[in-house]
Image (spheres, grey):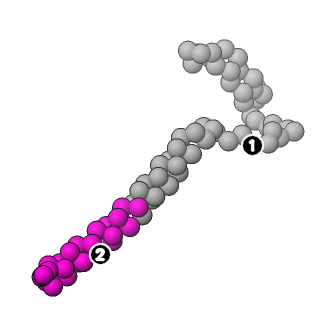
Amino acid sequence: MTDPTLNSHFRSLEIRMKQTERLLKVVLCSFLLLLCFFASLMLRPESIQAASPETLRVRKLVVLDDAGKVRIVIALCRH
């Protein structure tokens, strides 16, 4: 003969285990979604290029070499 309190205890454990399994599935799915989101951020281009304008207006243009040294300066001289 089985003890009714033992059966209710096992039933309670079974219910808690199923709830825990559901929670684990939710947590894993959330983690995977976050991982995909951060991966998409890491893989996107560093700068999104805007459509190139037909006219570029600047007051001064400075061209630098790889070392950062000024090589060419184009500007309007005002005296």
Percent x, y of residue 69: 58, 15
Tell me: 73 left or right of 37: right
**Where's residue 57, x and y in %?**
79, 38
Asked whether disc 2 touches disc 1, contact meaning CB atoms under 8 Å apart, the reply is: no
Towards the viewer: 69 or 38 = 38
Task: Give coordinates of residue 14: x percent, y percent.
Answer: 27, 72
Residue at x 55%, y 15% (from the top left corner): 67
Residue at horizontal 85 percent and vertical 38 percent from the top: 55
Residue 21 location, quadrant:
bottom left
* 22 in magenta: yes
Q: On screen, 63 above or below 37? A: above
Res 46 visible: yes
Magenta residue check for 3: yes
**Which kind of residue does numbered mark 2 sit on?**
Ile
| Prevailing secondary structure of the magenta residues | helix
**How far, Cα to Cα, is label 2 from label 1?**
56 Å
Q: Which mark is residue 50?
A: 1
Neighbour tally class for label 1: few under 14, some 14-19, many 20 plus, Cα within 10 Å: few
The circle on residue 15 is 2
| Residue at the right extreme of this rendering | 54
> Can you tell which quarter of the image residue 64 is in?
top right
Instruction: In this rendered view, identify the residue nearer to me: 7 or 41.
Output: 7
Magenta highlight range: 1-25
